[in-house]
Image (cartoon, helix red, strand yellow):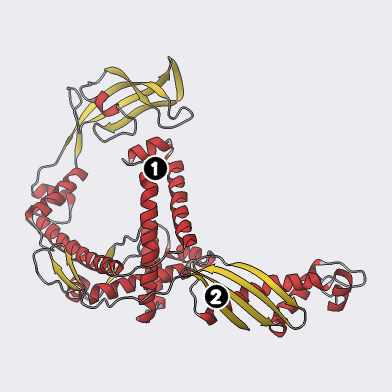
């Protein structure tokens, strides 16, 4: 097999592949067997029709077509390996010559990862947040813990911001009741930010037993987007009561006997989290520093595929939310145009990040051990709330194990960048990542796989 490469652009090539007919023999034998199974010829059992009879009755073209359907994709893969290009799209393949018995020729146009050099990343200077834990950090965690153990107590007063109300809701359009826009005994925190615009304003100042109506745009159902009168009937008003910060609370909320012990534990965990954050920031900022030094043309097809995938996921989220499209974006305080603009920016970055990290993976000869793949599956299964063996089977059945291994080695490449950097914190102190690894649990902190925006979370490997 002989392959010639023509560069159509920095991100697209055309391969011209010439293949001696002898190399098609395995695919041709398979083609005869397949055709023999499909045809019916008097005097022969299914699958036992000789090759010469198949050609006489149905023509050699039938066999050649089946042969090429089987052989060309495999030959394309071999050609890609031989010329050392990295495809990022499906190829446009065309068989341009069939010299029966001698050779075939086909072309394949495909988008590729462009050629570029990764600049030296040793000693890149990055700054991360300080790992010092303040009293405010501890108090913030304590307040969050108190919120978890708060109780609701009924009050004989009007509802205020932060109170909880139990209410009935119904909607009317031109005086006609909308059957699907009714709800009873709904518990809601005033000021939480309902997608039903105007609800919070209407609730403030209402007492138990009072009824009020306000106009708003419906956000779901058949009448989504239409203006309606929403009628609220408040059944009860409750205020949130936080537990006192004392030893009794410590015993209620933790395994500790005293508040001082609880505070000490929170401080220790806060420091651990800040150390892990330093590792995450060091790796991400070292990567950002490297990206600023590299100018890489991006294949249009790869960029479009990434953006389209994000738009598809967004459509799924909107559909699953049960909200109208406008209400969905209002809930997240953004617009469709802003999200699409983010998709363009984040997709371009994600592709560039992948190209750069893949180069580092190759230059550093990074690989994935069986144990690392197992650890990855176990962590991901815990996050998804499924059994590890179920996730492993799903990945294998859907040919996603390779994608999992790509995530793992790219995370390793990020770790290489972080370890190679000169890291200081915002107070000017030098940060030793390897010392952090040891302090956390005696071994290297393992970075969780990046999400579709290139964000990542780093956790200590148990």
Helix or strand or loop: what does disc 2 sit on? strand
Q: Quadrant of the N terminus?
A: bottom right
Residue found at the far top of this picture:
175
Is residue 236 visible to the viewer in this orientation of the structure? no
Q: Earlier in the sequence, mark 1 or mark 2?
A: 2
Measured from the top left, where is residue 169 in percent x and y?
36, 24
Given the current orientation, which residue lies at the most extreme right position? 43
Residue topped by disc 1: 336
Residue 101 locus on image (x, y percent):
77, 82
Say which element carries label 1. helix
The residue located at (24%, 31%) in the rendering is: 190
Q: Quadrant of residue 295?
A: bottom left
Q: Nearer the viewer, residue 5 or 461?
A: 5
Q: Residues within 10 Å of mark 1 (few under 14, many from 20)?
A: some
| Neighbour tally class for label 2: few under 14, some 14-19, many 20 plus, Cα within 10 Å | few
The residue positioned 26% from the left and 36% from the top of the image is: 192
Picture disc at residue 6: 2
Residue at 17 percent of width and 53 percent of height: 254
Please determine whether, in this image, residue 160 is positioned above or below residue 127.
above
Distance from Cα at disc 1 to Cα at disc 2: 41 Å
Q: Mark 1 or mark 2, which is nearer to you? A: 2
Q: Is residue 444 visible?
A: yes
Q: Kindly identify the residue that appears in the image at 22 percent across and 68 percent down.
A: 282
* Marks 1,2: beta carbons within 8 A: no
Checking the image for residue 31, the label placed there is none
Of residues 168 and 436, the one nearer the viewer is 436
Count the numbered circles shown: 2
Q: Quadrant of the C terminus?
A: bottom left
């Amino acid at each position: 097999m002989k392959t010639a490469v023509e560069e159509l652009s920095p991100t697209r090539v055309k391969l011209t592949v010439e293949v001696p007919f002898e190399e098609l023999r395995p695919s041709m034998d398979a083609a005869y067997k397949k055709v023999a199974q499909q045809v019916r010829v008097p005097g022969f059992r299914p699958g036992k029709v000789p090759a010469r009879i198949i050609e006489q009755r149905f023509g050699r073209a039938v066999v050649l077509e089946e042969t090429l359907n089987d052989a060309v994709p495999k030959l394309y893969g071999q050609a890609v390996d031989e010329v050392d290009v990295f495809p990022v799209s499906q190829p446009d393949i065309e068989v341009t010559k069939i010299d029966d018995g001698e050779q075939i020729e086909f072309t394949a146009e495909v988008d590729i990862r462009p050629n570029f050099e990764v600049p030296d990343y040793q000693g890149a200077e990055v700054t991360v947040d300080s790992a010092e834990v303040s009293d405010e950090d501890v108090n913030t965690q304590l307040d969050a813990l108190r919120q978890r153990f708060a109780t609701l107590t009924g009050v004989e007063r009007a509802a205020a911001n932060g109170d909880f109300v139990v209410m009935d809701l119904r909607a009317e359009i031109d005086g006609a009741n909308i059957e699907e826009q009714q709800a009873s005994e709904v518990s809601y925190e005033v000021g939480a930010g309902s997608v039903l615009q105007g609800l919070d304003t209407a609730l403030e100042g209402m007492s138990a037993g009072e009824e009020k109506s306000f106009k708003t745009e419906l956000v779901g159902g058949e009448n989504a987007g239409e203006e309606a009168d929403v009628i609220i009937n408040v059944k009860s008003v409750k205020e949130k009561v936080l537990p006192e910060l004392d030893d009794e609370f410590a015993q209620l909320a933790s395994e500790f006997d005293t508040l001082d012990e609880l505070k000490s534990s929170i401080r220790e965990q806060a420091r651990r989290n800040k150390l892990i954050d330093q590792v995450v920031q060091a790796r991400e900022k070292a990567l950002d520093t490297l990206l600023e030094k590299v100018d890489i043309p991006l294949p249009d097809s790869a960029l479009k595929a990434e953006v389209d995938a994000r738009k598809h996921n967004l459509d799924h989220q909107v559909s699953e939310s049960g909200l109208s499209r406008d209400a969905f974006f209002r809930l997240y305080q953004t617009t469709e145009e802003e999200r699409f603009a983010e998709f363009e920016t984040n997709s371009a970055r994600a592709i560039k990040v992948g190209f750069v990290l893949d180069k580092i993976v190759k230059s550093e000869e990074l690989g994935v051990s069986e144990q690392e793949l197992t650890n990855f599956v176990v962590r991901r299964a815990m996050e998804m709330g499924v059994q590890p063996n179920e996730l492993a089977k799903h990945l294998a059945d859907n040919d996603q194990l390779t994608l999992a291994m790509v995530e793992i080695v790219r995370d390793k490449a990020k770790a290489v960048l972080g370890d190679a950097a000169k890291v200081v914190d915002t107070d000017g102190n030098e940060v030793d990542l390897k010392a952090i690894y040891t302090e956390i649990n005696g071994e290297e902190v393992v970075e969780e796989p990046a999400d579709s925006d290139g964000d990542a979370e780093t956790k200590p490997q148990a």
